[in-house]
Image (tube, grey):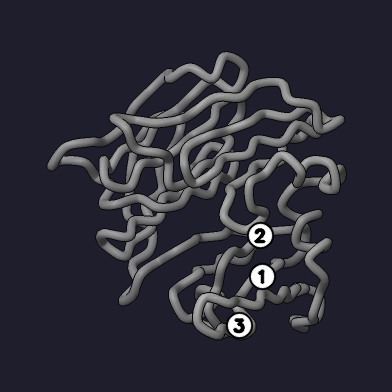
Amino acid sequence: MKTVFEGQILDVISVENGLVIAYIYEQDGNDVNVAYKMVTFDNGKIINVQKSMYELSKFGANYKQVVKHAKTHLSCKTVVLPNGKVFILEKDGSAKLLDGNAEEVWSGNLEYRGEAPSGIAVNNRSVWSCFKSRSVLMRMNVVTMREELRIGGGTSSPFKEPIDLFAVEDDIYVCNAGSNTVLKVNTNSYVTEEYKTFDQNILQFIKNGDYEFAVLENGVYLLD
C-alpha cells in the first residue's frame, strides 16, 4: 500500500479522476475543526479545498439545496443517481430520496430488527444496505423502497460487522469491521468472495477507474 494522506479521516468521496477527503484538522476536547483535501490522479497532488467542494462531491450539482435536507453533512451517507436524484441516509436510519430539484420524493426509516444501516450503495434499480451487528446485506427497490432480498445473518454469515459498501457495475464491495476484510458480492449470481485483507480496521473501500483505495483508521491508502 502507498500512503495517500495520513490523518483522522471522517469521510472520503470518490469523484471523477480523484478523491475528496474530510478529516479532523485539530481537536480540543469536544471542539473539532474539520478541513478538506482533494487528490487528483492526473498529477497526484493533494490540495486544500473548501467545504463546498466536499458538499458538491457528496450531494451532487444541486448540493446547496440538497444539503438542507441532511441533519449533518458529514455523518450522513449519500448516493447521487444518474438522473439527478439523491438518496440520503442518516445514522439513525431516517432516509430521503430527492429529485433533481431537491424536492422530497420519498422519506422513511430503513432498519432491520431495530438496527439502522451502517452503509448504503446503489446498483441498477436497487438500494443495497448493510447492518453491522446483524451481519446482513439487504437489497431494496429504489422505486418502492421495499425489501427485495436479504443475504447473510446468523453465525454462518459471510459478513462480519459490515460497516460500508461501494458499488461498481454488478459488484458490491463490503467492508467488514469484524474481520478487517473487503468482500466482493456479485449482484447477479450473489457469489461472495474475499477481495482484500488488512491488519487494521477498514472503514471504506473505494474503486475509481484503475485505482483502488482503502480508508483505514490512520489515513487513506492506494492499494497495489
Question: Quick check: marks 1 and 2 in contact, CB under 8 Å?
Answer: yes
Disc 3: which residue: 5
Residue 2: mark in rendering: none
Nearest to the observer: residue 159 or residue 147: 147
Q: Which residue is mark 2?
A: 13
Q: What's under tag 1, amino acid-wise?
A: Ile
Element class at badge 1: strand
In the image, residue 32 lies at what x, y percent? 60, 76
Q: Is residue 195 left or right of residue 165?
A: left
Side of 107 relative to 100 (left or right) = left
SS type, badge 3: strand
Compare marks 1 and 3 and give the one earlier in the sequence.
3
The location of residue 46, given as percent across then percent down, is 75, 82
Q: Which image quarter: residue 115?
A: top left
Amino acid type of the residue tagged 3 in the rendering: Phe
Q: Is residue 92 visible?
A: yes
Residue at 55 percent across and 73 percent down: it is 9
Dot 1 surroundings within 10 Å: few (below 14), some, or many (20 or more)?
many
Q: Relative to residue 174, is residue 206 depicted above or below?
A: below
Q: Is residue 33 above or below residue 156?
A: below
Q: Residue at x 78, y 41 (%)?
A: 66
The 10 Å Cα crowd at callout 3, few under 14, some 14 to 19, many 20 or more, is some
Q: Position of residue 120 (x, y in %)?
A: 51, 42
Disc 1 target residue: 21
Q: Earlier in the sequence, mark 1 or mark 2?
A: 2
At horizontal 82% and vertical 70% (from top left) the residue drawn is: 50
Quick one: label 2, few (<14), some, or many (20+) residues within 10 Å?
some
Q: CA distance from mark 1 to mark 2?
A: 7 Å
Q: Residue 10 is drawn in which quadrant?
A: bottom right
Q: Amino acid at mark 2?
A: Ile
Q: Please provide percent x and percent y for residue 43.
A: 80, 81
